[in-house]
Image (spheres, rainbow, N blue to C red):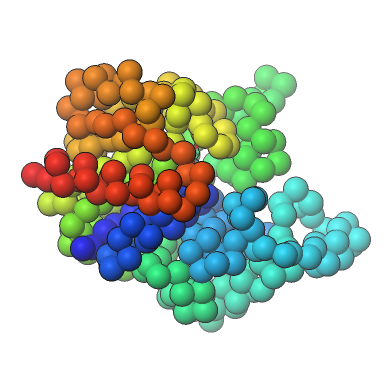
Amino acid sequence: MRIVVLAGGIGGARFLRGLKQAVPDAEITVVGNTGDDIHLFGLKVCPDLDTVMYTLGGGIHEEQGWGREGESFAVKDELAAYGVGPEWFGLGDKDFATHIVRTQMLGAGYPLSAVTEALCARWQPGVRLLPMSDDRVETHVAIEVDGEQRAVHFQEYWVKLRASVDAKAVVAVGAEAAKPAPGVLEAIAEADVILFPPSNPVVSVGTILSVPGIREAVAAAPAPVVGLSPIVGDAPVRGMADKVLAAVGVESTAAAVARHYGSALVDGWLVDTVDAGSVAEVEAAGIACRAVPLMMTDADATAAMARAALALAEEVRR
Ligand code: GDP
Ligand code: CA
């Protein structure tokens, strides 16, 4: 079975671990979000690709959900001693090596997709990890500070400001001119199943879909498309997805996110059992819906979620 997953960082990566456990023989292609990418200290950092790579490769800091386990921060401390920031983005010494290798290869002319493949040769994530695009796309967030509008990089909004101010708009800068990375459209067209993990619908899955051709390919794919809600009990399970959902005029409910994707894109939708009351609303929007436990508390619970998504995909197969 060929499965394509459009993934952000933590939500996507943890779901993928459960999916691999549920169907160890499946051929899984991950289309990763690169809208969160940022240049820091002259280095290209790809937080979502790395979270997927480290999580599936066994190098992730478990509790944190990003970065490497057992990190030290000597480089960061030395940079700070020179007064060189930003100090708000946590880069550990082990993590630095990844960004150095990536930046060196990009500088030598390799596209990001080839660099990602090279990094994965070490981590062996057990999936084919493709960036959504080799072209630069950067998510910016429009905010208002003291009555003045300004745009900040997504990482500044998320990590530095902790989404403490309202997002007025979210823009994937460069997306309109970006091309899907090699293999992305082919994987979508040839998939047996396409899954949207419980990743952020705006700044993870939404950004991937904003690359011209990807949304169209998913909508036109012969495979059933099933999504899992990142919103449980009218709030994000983790993080501040409600802030960016509000910016695009979407309520933070499992049903509203399903309607935001729409029946042209997704055929099936899973909500958590606490949101069972919204199944009828999702089905009224033309999307098959089931309520199952959606908390990724451990590998077994996550694998059960993956099996439920695949079962719903079989039900809705056109
Ligand atoms: P990020 O790039 O690291 O922010 O990660 P993603 O975009 O892949 O996933 C973030 C989303 O995962 C958030 O909106 C969370 O609500 C969601 N999430 C995290 N843990 C869980 C979980 O256990 N269950 C569900 N349903 N969603 C989760
Ligand atoms: Ca992310």
At a point 61% along the width and 71% down the height, the residue shown is: 98
- Whether residue 93 can be seen here: yes
Residue 204 percent across, percent down from the top left? 45, 45
Q: Is residue 126 above or below residue 257?
A: below
Task: Give the residue at the far front of this rendering.
Answer: 300
Residue 158 percent across, percent down from the top left? 62, 40
In the foreground, 290 or 74: 290
Residue 183 percent across, percent down from the top left? 29, 67
In the foreground, 221 or 2: 2
At a point 17% along the width and 62% down the height, the residue shown is: 190
At a point 65% along the width and 63% down the height, the residue shown is: 68
Q: Residue 282 occupies which quadrant of the picture?
A: top left
Q: Residue 47 occupies which quadrant of the picture?
A: bottom right
- Whether residue 261 can be seen here: no
Residue 34 percent across, percent down from the top left? 47, 55
At a point 74% along the width and 64% down the height, the residue shown is: 71
Indicate the quadrant containing the N terminus: top left, top right, bottom left or bottom right. bottom left
Q: Is residue 48 above or below residue 119?
A: above
Q: Is residue 317 left or right of residue 94?
A: left
